[in-house]
Image (spheres, coloured by chain):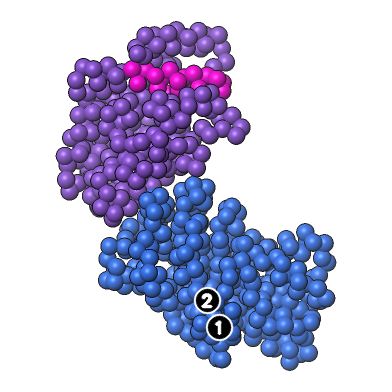
Amino acid sequence: MDKKMVTELEGLAAKIRINSIEAIRKVGAGHIGGSLSIADLLAVLYGKQMVYDPKNPQWEKRDRLVLSKGHAGPAWYSTLAAVGFFPEEWLWTLNEGGTNLPSHPDRIKTPGVDATTGSLGQGTSLAAGIATGLKMQGSESYVYLIVGDGELNEGQCWEAFQFIAHFKLNRCIVIIDENKKQLDGTTQDILNPFDIAEKMRAFGFSTQKVKGDDLIAIDQAIEDCKKVEDQAVCIVLDTIKGQGVKFFEEMDANHSVKFDSKAVQEATDKALEELRKGCV
Amino acid sequence: MFTLADNHEIGKELRTTVVDALKEAMAIDEKIVALDADLGGASKWTDLAKDVPDRFINVGIAEANMVGVAAGLSLTGYTPFIHTFGPFATRRVLDQIYLSGAYADNTINIYGSDPGFAAGHNGGTHTTWEDIALLRSIPKVVICDAADEVQMDWIIKEFAKLKGVHYVRGNRKGVKKVYAPGSTFSIGKGNLLREGQDYLIVAAGQLVSEALEVAEMLEEKGISTDVIDMFTIKPLDKELLLERFGGKKAVITIENHSITGGLGSAVAEVLAENGLAIPLKRIGVDERFGQVGTPSFLQEEFGLTAEKILEQVKDL
């Protein structure tokens, strides 16, 4: 990836973070931690890897994204707005009555959203089904499936992974956001996931583990996935919940953040100021 | 338009009926896909693997994933049919049917086999007397209970043309014939099979044939009876019910299902909401779990044979 592209993706990642935080702050509270941990991934996907047309969201040849960890909706919406699926103003209606941007993605309401998710685990099977359908049609489109590490508590994920591996759905790129925290605490404390990459390998996936804030590494990992034939593919992203904003990274319970104190507001203002410097 | 069968012998196995109907539908529409969860031998859907290998998927023993994969196929323009035993096609995967299916406006056609006493030797774990109650609570889901092979054949072919989530329950084995070949139906329209003045019987599924027998026996006792085959439990044909309630001394519902939340409850709601004080007798299973036994033993044990039903309704 050339320097110009890196700068561009950095700018997009910053914009995703800024708008996710602003949208959630406006509504008073929301899923900051898991939104920020996938901002860099979304920048690589929508800034470089994915094939799509914001003017024609249902374009047959588009790549699909299934955000199985649906609570990170704000990050996805910020991305979709940034690349032109809908006006940025929509972001300031997040979770308001009658909005097109509900907390968890809804394919009926939001242009660019292909799969309705929110009940954890279910997106994995949806992606498996979409990848199966595309394969049956001889399509060359990719399906990007983003799963949370806490979400892996759900048994349905493992049903779907067996399916994806068995049918060698190599155009379904499974990306696990290992941010090491879930709502009630660390994944270690709540339900030990052990070594996720090793588990995925044992399930039959060609698996890579990369730093989740390294745009070049994420991009390369996706490129490597695209070279794999005859085997399911997985990328485990080593991320931090709240990634990219030190204040949120260090916050203990950052799954859902309430913007109800002066301290949080001031820290957020400072963080946004920093992020805006990187947003060209 | 339907006509009644000229005999009430046991017909073709419903599972074979489903497979044959699917084969026909799949030959016409290349977007139809069939999925089973390692019960292809029990459902005979493995036959589809021979005919249309590209469009039959055995997902393994993973029902939740099967529903999600079906929804994903719908998202790429396919019309999926899925099968497993009734309880695993409904109560085990309720959230998947709700969200990945109905809420997300996807198309999934579900055949839940061996409802209620049809579970036979598979016993209480495999018995579903709550599937209709569960699915009735989900907006827009269509629920059918097939009376016989002719109706099952029509239902499968009709589902193949529609968008949305549709559920049909039915025995895998053969059941008594009710309809003559070539009969057609309408989703959401009950079928008035017999007209009378005293009682209104509303039945569904394989107990429609028992309902007709009960009506015969009541006739001998001087009680004349309407019989409606309410094969679509949702949406319910309220119009037909309201038309036939008039002047009746009693309303009787007959279902191979719990009396809570199924056909009996649906009919009770229509009676109550319209201020009609007609005595209602709901024949079905009341606060009991299933158990092992032959289907005929279980039908008798749970009071769902024509004779047992008659005992419960003759003195209304």
Q: Give the residue at the far front of this rendering.
A: A55
Q: Position of residue A15 (x, y in %)?
A: 39, 19
Name the quadrant containing residue A43. Answer: top left
Q: Position of residue B140 (x, y in %)?
A: 57, 55
**Identity of the residue drawn at 30% across and 50% down:** A134
| Location of residue A231 with respect to A196 vertically, above or below | below
Mark 2 / mark 1, whichever is N-terminal: 2
- Chain designation of label 1: B
Chain A painted colour = purple
Name the quadrant containing residue B256. Answer: bottom right
Colour blue belongs to chain = B
> Is mark 2 in CB contact (under 8 Å) with mark 1?
yes
**Identity of the residue drawn at 40% across and 11% down:** A276
The one nearer the camera, A29 or A274, is: A274
Q: Which residue is mark 1?
A: B179
**Identity of the residue drawn at 77% across and 59% down:** B273
In the image, residue A215 lies in the stretch drawn in magenta: no
- Chain designation of label 2: B
Q: Is residue B294 left or right of residue A171?
A: right
The stretch in magenta equals A11-37
Q: Which residue is mark 2?
A: B151
Res. A150 mark: none
Amino acid marked by disc 2: Gln
Amino acid marked by disc 1: Tyr
Name the quadrant containing residue B278. Answer: bottom right
